[in-house]
Image (cartoon, rainbow, N blue to C red):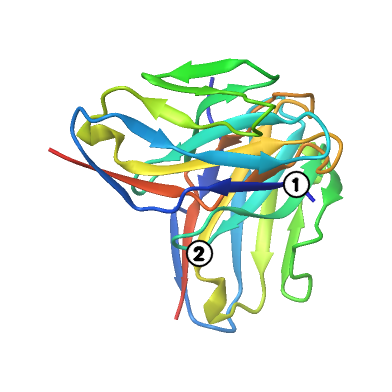
Amino acid sequence: EAGVAQSPRYKIIEKRQSVAFWCNPISGHATLYWYQQILGQGPKLLIQFQNNGVVDDSQLPKDRFSAERLKGVDSTLKIQPAKLEDSAVYLCASSANTLMGTEAFFGQGTRLTVV
Amino acid sequence: GDSVTQMEGPVTLSEEAFLTINCTYTATGYPSLFWYVQYPGEGLQLLLKATKADDKGSNKGFEATYRKETTSFHLEKGSVQVSDSAVYFCALSDPVDSNYQLIWGAGTKLIIKP
């Protein structure tokens, strides 16, 4: 089966610019996650969707970050305006459901550099 | 709240050495436990998992046993290869306290020298 697709793979922008990332989860997966991974650290959950509803966005900096999952399939994550500290890899993951033991499948990530 | 603690890295070993990466956890409920691996420049991949006490997850020569009495899920491999060089993350999913979200350890970088 096809994996989680993310684009772009790399993005370089200047601070105060805006950027958007796209994610296409594995077909049929109801749960979608966006993570931020700063170099040398573990992933930090930004937002979790169940179908097209938000389950948890408690760590999403809502003054500059937004995310949507239209029709419960694809998702976009936007940053506007970007700051230097937003430089990180943004990972999208999906899982089939939230039952015990169901693992998350990750995309290759988008490496964002803010200069 | 739930948490995962891993041994700090980097861990540097020679090829064919025995590997142990320690992982302990705290959880309110009965979590599932996972090891993920991240090779250089790549995304996270599930390495193995265990869903209940005394379960042993295994894959690619790696093993980890879910020990409820010691709240541990240590990763082991009998003979490592250079290709095992990567960052390894221990994680848990707890339906009671974290709504099935993955709670991550900080990661342990493994370096295998030929």
**Which residue is label 1 attached to?**
B2
Name the kind of residue labelled 2 in the image. Ala
Q: Rounded to the nearest whole Å, what is the CA distance between mark 2 and mark 1?
A: 25 Å
Residue in the picture at 74% in, 53% down? A47
**In the shown orientation, is residue A61 left or right of residue A106?**
right
Q: Which mark is residue A88?
A: 2
Residue A100, quarter of the rendered image: top right
Residue B66 in the image, given as x and y percentages of width and height: 61, 24
Q: Chain of mark 1?
A: B
Q: Nearer the viewer, mark 2 or mark 1?
A: 1
**In the shown orientation, is residue A110 left or right of residue A33?**
left
For label 2, the SS is strand
Residue in the picture at 80% in, 57% down? A57
Residue A56 in the image, given as x and y percentages of width and height: 82, 51
Name the kind of residue labelled 1 in the image. Asp
Residue positioned most to the bottom:
A16
Mark 1 closeness class: few <14, some 14–19, many ≥20 residues within 10 Å: some
For label 1, the SS is loop
Residue B80, quarter of the rendered image: top left
Residue A32 in the image, given as x and y percentages of width and height: 71, 40
Residue in the picture at 79% in, 24% down? A99
